[in-house]
Image (cartoon, grey):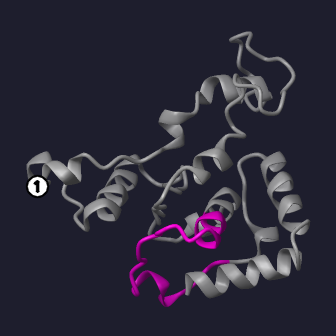
């Protein structure tokens, strides 16, 4: 489930319910056993955020003594595992906030691009939300950590037709 951490956790949970069942009620009695058995991967539960953030040095004020040089694909560093997760799922959900800031986040655009280009079921976005599309160039997208944006944008630039093709694809597929 792609999301933006600036949105509330409650809205994220409602988006998961909507994606899974078409309902947004938060009472378990409103769901069938089959609906309750559906699973979703969320980075907050699948990535040790404390270890990853401290070891990458993002939280410079942290005193937990876990900081050491980042080693790509080292199991202790979990922030580079998103592509592995995306390869193992059959559906992809997108939790949008009311201002659509979600679509301005570089990680979200990257995950959405992967899902759409690999034929994953992404569900539907309501026509009301899409009245004012806001998908901008990935070069203008935001990231909490500049290193993330540089890594993602550089990977997109290396593709055939680079950023221009990526941006056209995002505009076309999200309208």
Horizontal arrangement in the rendering, residue 119 relative to residue 63 (left or right): left
**Residue 44: x, y in percent?**
51, 37
**Residue 88: x, y in percent?**
55, 49
Q: Which residue is mark 1?
A: 30
**Residue 95: x, y in percent?**
45, 61
Where, by quadrant of the figure, is residue 112 drawn? bottom right
Q: Is residue 85 magenta?
A: no
Instruction: Tell me the quarter of the image containing the C terminus.
Output: bottom right
For the point 35% across and 63% down, which residue is it?
Answer: 19
For the point 84% across and 75% down, which residue is it?
Answer: 163
User: In the displayed image of the protein, which residue is found farthest to the left?
Assistant: 29
Other residues around mark 1 within 10 Å, as few (<14) / some (14–19) / many (≥20) = few
- Answer yes or no: is residue 26 visible: no
> Over which residues does the magenta segment extend?
112-135
- Considering only vertical position in the picture, is 37 above or below 96? above
- Considering only vertical position in the picture, is 93 above or below 88? below
- Considering only vertical position in the picture, is 74 above or below 116? above
Q: Is residue 114 magenta?
A: yes
For the point 76% across and 23% down, which residue is it?
Answer: 55
- Answer yes or no: is residue 74 visible: yes
Horizontal arrangement in the rendering, residue 128 relative to residue 53 (left or right): left
**Residue 38: x, y in percent?**
30, 50
- Main SS, magenta residues: loop
Disc count in the image?
Answer: 1
Q: Secondary structure at mark 1?
A: helix
For the point 10% across and 55% down, which residue is it?
Answer: 30
In this rendered view, identify the residue nearer to me: 87 or 77: 87
In this rendered view, identify the residue nearer to me: 41 or 34: 34
In this rendered view, identify the residue nearer to me: 120 or 56: 120
């Amino acid at each position: 489930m792609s999301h933006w951490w600036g949105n509330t956790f409650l809205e994220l949970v409602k988006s998961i319910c909507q994606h899974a069942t078409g309902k947004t009620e938060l009472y378990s009695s409103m769901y069938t056993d089959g609906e309750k058995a559906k699973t979703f991967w969320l980075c907050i539960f699948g990535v040790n955020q404390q270890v990853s953030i401290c070891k990458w040095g993002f939280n410079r004020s942290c005193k937990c003594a876990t900081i050491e040089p980042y080693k790509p694909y080292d199991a202790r560093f979990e922030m580079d595992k998103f592509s592995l997760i995306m390869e193992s799922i059959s559906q992809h959900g997108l939790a949008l906030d009311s201002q659509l800031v979600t679509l301005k986040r570089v990680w979200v655009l990257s995950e959405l691009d992967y899902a759409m280009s690999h034929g994953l079921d992404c569900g539907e976005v309501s026509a009301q939300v899409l009245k004012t599309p806001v998908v901008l160039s990935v070069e203008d997208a935001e990231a909490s950590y500049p290193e993330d944006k540089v890594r993602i944008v550089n990977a997109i630039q290396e593709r055939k037709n680079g950023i221009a093709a990526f941006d056209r694809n995002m505009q076309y597929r999200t309208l």
